[in-house]
Image: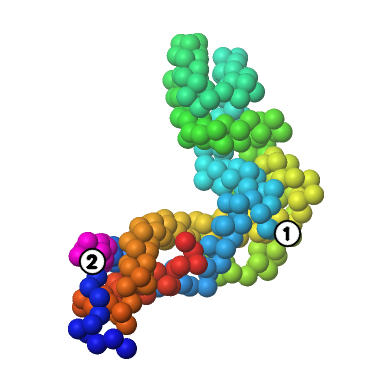
């Protein structure tokens, strides 16, 4: 082994690069530690991450189901507005109001962009309001339009409203039942699929009917599909805030990795057996423990 005096010097520019990278690692590690949570390594959260990867890639158990699950998610998130739309169309049926409902349906058939749809609805609302005699009727049609905007804030919502109307307005009531079922898992263990299977099998007719509306592929229109769908939506609802924080953490670790790689390369190129290493080369790399914990997710 070479004595310290006989070891080679590391170029000053290389030491500076190492020092700067080390400082960046230190800064990122401080932020990463404030975001890191014990929950990120829990069994349920890890299960959600696995299922979410399958969902995002339209693979595994969720192959061919992504579009249908997204439609159901939107339906459950906006179910109150769907039910209000149904109630308004059922209760307020003057000629002008019915004409307005038909106009909305014809817009949905055209598969318009969201802004184009909303502008057309507003223009028609201005035309129809003077034709409605009662204040109650006018208020009802304005409320109807407000709920349309809630449901149709994106293309998924537009498509979903069209699909429900295409089949039967009374199918909106399915959302109430499915919503109550989904809500029943709010504080339950979500790891076991058996709990979901039991509920779906008891309500199989409702789910199979809903499957036609949300375009579940025919070969997938079986109870198991709705069990894994409910499980995914329940996990997503429970962990959506934590998932956003986890994604933020992974983003930081990817930045961290950009500064870690040159440090490793420098350490490999200038080993202590051959080069005079300054003290910073011997210091523990800040954030390495967090990086190692989540490296498989990067």
The image shows residue 260, relative to residue 100, as above or below, that is below
Secondary element at image label 2: loop
Q: Bin the neighbour count of mark 1 within 10 Å (Cα to Cα): few under 14, some 14-19, many 20 and up.
A: some
The answer to whether residue 61 is magenta is no
Horizontal side, residue 42 vs residue 192: left or right: left
Residue at 59% x, 20% y is 107
The image shows residue 75, relative to residue 287, as above or below, that is above
Give the residue pinned by disc 2: 11
The answer to whether residue 23 is magenta is yes
The image shows residue 2, relative to residue 198, as above or below, that is below
Nearer to me, 185 or 283: 283
Q: Quadrant of residue 235?
A: bottom right
User: Picture coordinates of residue 214 (x, y %)?
Assistant: 67, 42
What stretch of residues is rendered in magenta?
Answer: 11-24
Nearer to me, 284 or 146: 284
User: Picture coordinates of residue 234 (x, y %)?
Assistant: 55, 58
Horizontal side, residue 51 vs residue 226: left or right: left
Residue at 62% x, 21% y is 110
Q: Bin the neighbour count of mark 2 within 10 Å (Cα to Cα): few under 14, some 14-19, many 20 and up.
A: few
Q: Quadrant of residue 156?
A: top right
Secondary element at image label 1: helix
Give the residue pinned by disc 1: 224
User: Picture coordinates of residue 272 (x, y %)?
Assistant: 30, 80
User: Picture coordinates of residue 140 (x, y %)?
Assistant: 48, 26
Mark 2 vs mark 1: in front: 2
Residue at 66% x, 54% y is 59
Specify the color scheme: rainbow
Residue at 74% x, 57% y is 223
Separation of residues labelled 2 and 1 (CA atoms):
63 Å
């Amino acid at each position: 082994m070479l004595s310290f005096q006989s070891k080679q010097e590391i170029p000053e520019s290389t030491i500076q690069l190492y020092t700067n990278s080390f400082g960046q690692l230190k800064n990122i590690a401080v932020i990463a530690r404030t975001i890191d949570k014990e929950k990120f390594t829990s069994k349920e959260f890890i299960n959600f991450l696995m299922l979410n990867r399958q969902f995002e890639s339209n693979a595994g158990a969720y192959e061919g189901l992504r579009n249908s699950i997204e439609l159901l998610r939107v339906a459950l998130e906006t179910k109150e507005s769907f039910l209000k739309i149904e109630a308004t169309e059922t209760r307020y049926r003057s000629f002008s109001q019915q004409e307005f409902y038909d106009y909305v349906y014809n817009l949905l058939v055209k598969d318009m962009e969201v802004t184009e749809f909303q502008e057309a609805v507003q223009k028609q609302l201005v035309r129809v309001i003077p034709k409605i005699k009662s204040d109650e009727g006018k208020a009802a049609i304005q409320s109807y339009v407000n709920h349309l905007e809630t449901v149709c804030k994106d293309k998924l919502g537009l498509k979903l409203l069209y699909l429900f109307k295409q089949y039967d307005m009374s199918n909106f009531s399915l959302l109430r039942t499915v919503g109550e079922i989904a809500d029943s898992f709010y504080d339950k263990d979500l790891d076991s699929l058996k709990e979901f299977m039991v509920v779906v099998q008891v309500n199989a007719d409702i789910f199979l009917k809903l499957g036609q509306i949300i375009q579940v592929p025919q070969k997938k229109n079986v109870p198991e599909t709705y069990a894994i769908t409910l499980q995914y939506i329940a996990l997503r609802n429970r962990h959506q805030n934590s998932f956003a924080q986890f994604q933020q953490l992974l983003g930081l670790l990817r930045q961290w990795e950009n500064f870690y790689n040159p440090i490793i390369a420098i350490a490999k190129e200038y080993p202590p057996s051959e080069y005079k290493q300054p003290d910073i080369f011997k210091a523990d790399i800040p954030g390495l423990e967090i990086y190692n914990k989540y490296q498989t997710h990067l």
